[in-house]
Each structure stands twice: as structure tokens, then as C-alpha cells.
Amino acid sequence: MTHADRPSLPPLRVAIIGSGPSAFYAADFLQRKATFDLEIDMFERLPTPYGLVRGGVAPDHPKIKSVTRAYERTASDPRMRFFGNVEFGRDIRHIDLIRHYHAIIYAVGAQTDRRLGIPGEDLPGSHAATEFVGWYNGHPDYCDLSFDLTQESAVVVGNGNVAMDVARILARTYEELHTTDIAPHALEALRESRIKKIYVLGRRGPAQASFTNPEIKELAELEGADVIVPPEDAKLDTLSRRYVRQADRATARNVEIIAEYSRRQPTGKPRQIIMRFLVSPVEILGTERVEAVRVVKNKLCKSADGTLRPRPTDETEVIPAGLVFRSIGYHGVALPDVPFDEVMGVIPNVEGRVIEPDGTFRTGEYVVGWIKRGPTGIIGSNKPDALETVERLLEDASAGRLLHPPQPSRAGVEELLARRQIRVVTFEDWRRIDAIERERGAAVGRERVKFTHVEDMLAALADPRREPTPS
Ligand code: NAP
């Protein structure tokens, strides 16, 4: 007997691990498509939901963050509960979930960065862009880091949208940042920044850059920084010219924008973003800390799969810089008791169904988002991704291929977490944190002033002087 042919069976219970966009789209599709009674419990290790929408999207991109209004509607559905401040593998384990749920969806994203693998990478002053992004967004894991912004030059390695975010935030003026929800510590530190030159290094050419048109265009709109592209770096080689003729409009537009930048003269703004192409860092130089980056000039060659790959030449150059931000992509992290592909940094799966190393399916376990497909795509890419997984889950529910939990009750998990003395942060609690942050922001003319430490969020919730805000 399955849930699909007997809707009167006890509700189908689904645990979702993580609360970023892919988690919310999975919950939304479950709510809309299930033809039987359903209970969704979403577990999040932080007290705050929304994953990279809160901790990754740049503070000067508030429109992108408005997707959370849809997530709030999903969270308001009576079939869904939010368990914030509950970490998978520590507060709740795999073995607990299979006792309480018919299905588990992993939506944990890609938690770490890829490494360059070059000498000097660990010198003080060399940072993963993911750390800087977490820091300026007030993510509790990164808020106590410090970045030496007394340096005059910084290098950002990579040509993706994260590299654009990092370069832009380094270049923005205090006035531009003040109205955003950037973390208070980052706002103050960036106010004192002495950085004048921000080099952005692409290992391939403008035609192969992975930043998108609005992000590259936005660099030219900064109040306090000129964009500079050396004309010889903007020039396309024969292979790239041929490639652009066949490529999509967005690629051609990136090339046009870069070419236009290369024809501009600096206007004398206090900062410069200098975009270099066809260069790869080969060594980060310095004795006590980062002092410079040695780069090698590349040329493009056609690889076996037809893509144009960078090949080093004999020509090298040293770029003086006291800070390096490695922005060459995110990488997933293994979860305890869950299969993992170390090379790809994903949970191995077929259309969202988790598979074991021997290729067999893991009953009742699913995956969505970056931990399913790798760290690519924009927020909206998670919709079709989550839909595919939910359709497979519902097919399995119809075929009776889910887990058979011995304790499938709503109260069971609450009791378990209470026994373990976990201070669960509910969605109502989150609404209070949200309201307090907005109030703190309104008081100083800012969008919100974020809490950056978990203890402070929990203390605010425990503070009897703070009246719960009606939802
Ligand atoms: P990404 O788009 O994959 O870009 C990674 C960049 O690093 C590429 O330019 C890549 O060059 C380069 N790279 C990789 N290995 C390298 C190496 N060893 N040396 C030098 N360069 C290297 O990744 P991302 O910027 O982290 O962004 C992740 C995803 O989030 C993307 O889909 C992005 O669009 C999205 N995102 C969107 C926004 C937005 O919509 N505003 C903002 C932030 C992030 P190759 O191409 O040569 O490999």
C-alpha cells in the first residue's frame, strides 16, 4: 500500500537538510504536487534560513534577495516546519532521520572553496573568496576573520560572478555600502580600506569568462572606481574569434563590453579595477605575508573535447599585491553517513536519487542544488533542479519505494531534539530575528543590521524585553 493509492495513510514525512534556495524550491514543489498528506521538516544548522541568499548574494544586490518572499510563503504552509540551529551529523544524525522520515532530501550546497594548488597559497593575506563573501555578509562562520585592507593592491583570481562580487565590494565607497545590509564589521573595515588597485585575473580570454553581462556592466557604474582593461588583454585570438561567432549572445556581449572598457581612459577615480586576461597565478610571493603574485601568460589551445583551454607560455610577470582572493569556484563537503564523490564534490545521484558507490539506489534519499549538480547556475537554476528531484521522490512514493520509519510522528523529532537539549529556532523565532535586524537597520538608515554571532541571535530570542513581532 503506497501513499499515492491510499491518501488516508498517515502523512508522508520528508526531512530536508539545508534551507537555501534549492531546499525551499524542493519544499514548494512537494507542497504543490503531493496528492496525499505531507509533513516537511527543514533542518538548518544556523538559526537563520535562506543559505546563500543571506550569506552569499552580495549586499549591493538587494533585488536578488527578494526571492525570500516566496520562501516565506512556502514556510508558512502548515505542512512545513523549520528547525533552525540544528546541525545534521551532530544534533541530528542519519540514523535518527531514517527512524522518523519516509524520505530525506539533502540540500546543503557547496560549503568550501576550490584551491589553486600553487606555492604561497597559504601565506597570510591569501584568502578564499568564499571567506571574504561570508565575512561581508555576516555569516557566523566567517564574521571573526580579518582582512588586511591597509594594503594598496589586491588580486582576485577567477572570472566568475563571485570574482565580480568581490572586486565590486572592494571597490565600493562607504556611501554606496552604507544603505545595504552588509555586516557592520565589514562596513567599518571597508570604510578604512586603503586599497587602490584591484586586479581581476582570468586564465582564459574575455570570450571564455563566466561572469554574466549585468555583473560586468555594473563595474563601470561604480562611483569610486575606474575599470581598466589593457588593450592587448582584450584582443581575441583567432580561435576565440571563431568561437564567439558561434557562441550565444551573452558571450558576444561580454566580449563587446570588455572591448569597450579597453578603449576607455581612466577618469581619475580613487580606485581602479584592472581586468587581466590569459594569465594564471603560478606562485604567491612573500616571506611573512603576501607581497606579490607571479603569473604566467597563457595562450588558448583546443582540447580533445573541443573547448579552448589555457596553456602556459614562457612569459611571466609579477603583480605586486598584499591581498589575494581565490575565486575559482566552490566545492561540496561530505556529510556523515552519506555517499560522496570527492572529485566532483557532490552526492552521487541519478536525477536526484542518491546512489551508493556500487551504483545502486539508496532508498528514500534524494539531493537537490549545488550538492546535486555542482556549484553552477543562478538561484533560478534550482527550480528545475528541485522539480526533477521531487518528481522522482513522488514516483518512488507511488511505487512504495520509500523508507519505512518506525517512529513517523511529528512529535518524535521534537522530543528527540529536546532530549539532546538543542535550542531549536523555529520559523516564528526567525521572524523575530528578522524583525529585530530590520528595526536595528531602520534606526541608522540601513536596510537591516544583521546579527553575526549565533549566541547574539539566541540571546535576542531569550530577551524578555523584546516583544515577539506579530507575523
Ligand atoms: P564560476 O562561475 O564557476 O567561475 C569560476 C572561475 O574560476 C572561472 O572563471 C574559472 O575559469 C576560474 N578558475 C577555475 N580554476 C582556476 C584556476 N586553477 N586558475 C585560475 N582560474 C580558475 O564560479 P563562481 O564565480 O564561484 O560562481 C558560482 C556560481 O554562482 C556561478 O554559477 C555564478 O554565476 C553564480 N553566482 C551568480 C551571481 C549573480 O547572479 N549575481 C553572483 C555570484 C555567483 P575557467 O572558465 O577557465 O575554468
Image (cartoon, grey):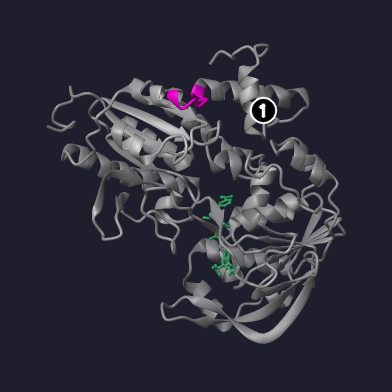
Question: Residue 271 appears at what percent x and percent y?
Answer: 83, 57
Horizontal side, residue 70 vs residue 320: left or right: left
Question: Residue 292 appears at what percent x and percent y?
Answer: 78, 70
Q: Which residue is mark 1?
A: 456
| Amino acid carrying mark 1 in the image | Asp
Question: Residue 140 appears at what percent x and percent y?
Answer: 63, 39
Horizontal side, residue 102 vs residue 237: left or right: left
Residues in magenta, as a range: 419-427
The quadrant of the picture occupied by the N terminus is: top left
Q: Is residue 29 magenta?
A: no
Q: Is residue 460 above or below residue 331?
A: above
Visible residue check, residue 165? yes
Identify the residue shown where x is 48% and y is 37%.
87
Q: Is residue 162 above or below residue 95?
A: below
Q: Secondary structure at mark 1?
A: helix
Identify the residue shown where x is 18% and y is 31%.
3
The answer to which of 41 and 276 lies nearer the viewer is 41
Q: Is residue 420 magenta?
A: yes
Question: Residue 440 appears at what percent x and percent y?
Answer: 72, 24
